[in-house]
Image (cartoon, rainbow, N blue to C red):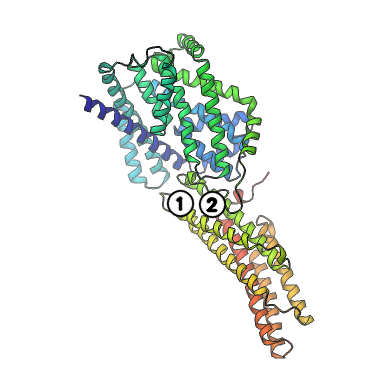
Amino acid sequence: MALSLLASLLGGLGLFLHGMTTLTNGLKMAAGNSLRSILKKWTHPLYKGVISGFSITALVQSSSAVTVAVIGFVNAGIMDLSRSIGVIYGANLGTTVTGWLVTAIGYSVHIKSMALPLIGIGVFMRITGKNSRRGHLGDALTGFGLFFLGIELLQDGFGSLGQNMDLTALASGHFWTVPAFVGVGFLLTLIMQSSSGAIAVVLTAATSQMIGMESAAAAVIGSNIGTTSTAALSVIGATSNAKKVALGHIIFNIVTAAAALLLLPVLLHMVGIIQANVAFASGPAGTLALFHTTFNFLGVLIMWPFTPRLVSFLENRISHPGAAHTKYLDKTLINTPNLALDALAMELERIGRKLRELQSNLIFNNQQKFSSQTRLETLELIKACQGYAMTIQQYDVPSSIGSRIPIALRVCQYYRTIEESIRELHAMQALLPDSVPDNIQERIDNFMDECWYELKLAENPCAEDFEDADSKLEHLTGIYHRLKETLLQAGAENKLDISQMVQLLDYYSLVHKTMERTLKSTRYWLDLRTREEACPTE
């Protein structure tokens, strides 16, 4: 009997969590750039961010997924930290929808009659749709079906467990009862890494009359605190932006939980009054769903006026890492390929700026500002981007994402060759002659002026002039060939020492190649990002 109960509980929990994961991933992949568009346009002012966070979390049934998305958008510069906080508020409200689903559907319809067809249709859509949007929607339907089957198994398991287990000692009304059940909710969420899963367990236990309402409410509060563990674990080794968003999430949940604990009797009394006048919130599950919604809404009201101070605190508390560390690459985004690609593109843009600065300081008579340490740091960043791109490639990504990863790797390869060229140019400069004939110097000045222009062009790839980069590169090549001819003629006529001629030819040939690679890498970076992303309009 005990083994059968344990199998039922573990199986139900496994189906529930797997269903939640499948549902979340399916909707996330099917949404594609729609999630980006919604959060980009509907996060300011604060109330829009709350609405967006609530709506998307209610749809994908995972506040963690929405939090990861927010981290990606903050990293990519699509939204600032103040906007992300509003979405975090809304995401916490959105998690309360799970309780309402369990209440409204899990206890009022025959679950198998709805779940099994959903699983069948979902699997058929996945088989026929493969990696298309239809296939991902099929995953979402399958996840819904598994979600509800898991609830049924949990109901059966807790119903039987309630007949054979006495929890009166734990829920006896002593002063430690509430803290104990807060701890139970926290541990359930910590173990399952899903507050929705923990709340489903608490709701089914309360419905089976295994625990009292106050104890169940305390466990729901504990699960709310438990979600902070997911945020804390997810940002270990992550970027500073990720840590700011996660810390904001943790602060909100702790403040909300503290307020709920202090006002627990009052909130339960208010819920009882509301239940007496609202038919759809009847029963223990309805009580807990309404309680969960009420205290999260209270948390939003408490934190709302302090949001500017919270943002300022987060900005000042967590600083950006040094130049040797990546700023945008975040391991938590890997499971969301479109966001991971955004982060990669932003990091590549940052590296491009560093390389152009190195070129400017080294090539254009400003060697005293050249830093070998900066060059080495840039090389480490390039390697990190290559590794990040190859990691994304290992996941099941849509074709629209998969086709852009080779472009990112090509940009990385161009950056590697530019870095190598900078290193070689630095070594060659010491061998250049101090002076050359006036006609050669004139050609050199003309060539270097054009190189400077091309470098500035790469710094602003959104300008109209960059559209004609190919013809400008051809123009630069023509100027280089005239310089080359002048150097060869001077050497042939003994107007320039042969060894000096070779040194100058090698040096300016490499300068020309470096400029060419700079423009090409910038062009490929534009291909990696859409025009709107690369050149946002105010």
**Quadrant for the N terminus in the image:** top left
Whether residue 389 is situated above or below residue 206 in the rendered picture: below
Q: Which mark is residue 286?
A: none
Where disc 1 sits, the SS reads helix
Indicate left or right for 437 with 79 as reference.
right
| Residue under the point 59% across and 39% down | 40
Q: Nearer the viewer, residue 498 or 124?
A: 498
Please, what is the three-letter code of the amino acid marked with disc 2? Leu
Label 2 crowd (10 A; few <14 / some 14-19 / many >=20): many
**Quadrant for the C terminus in the image:** top right
Residue 82: x %, y % from top left: 62, 35
Q: Quadrant of residue 20?
A: top left
Q: Nearer the viewer, residue 310 or 340?
A: 310
Residue 223: x %, y % from top left: 44, 26
Residue 387: x %, y % from top left: 48, 56
Q: Which residue is mark 1?
A: 392
Whether residue 333 is situated above or below residue 443 in the rendered picture: above
Where disc 2 sits, the SS reads helix
Indicate left or right for 114 with 438 as reference.
left
Q: Are marks 1 and 2 in contact (CB under 8 Å)?
A: yes
Q: Which residue is mark 2?
A: 344
Furthest-bottom residue in view? 493
* Camera sees residue 165: yes
Please, what is the three-letter code of the amino acid marked with disc 1? Ile
Whether residue 345 is situated above or below residue 209 in the rendered picture: below
Q: Earlier in the sequence, mark 1 or mark 2?
A: 2
Label 1 crowd (10 A; few <14 / some 14-19 / many >=20): many
Indicate left or right for 302 with 112 as reference.
right
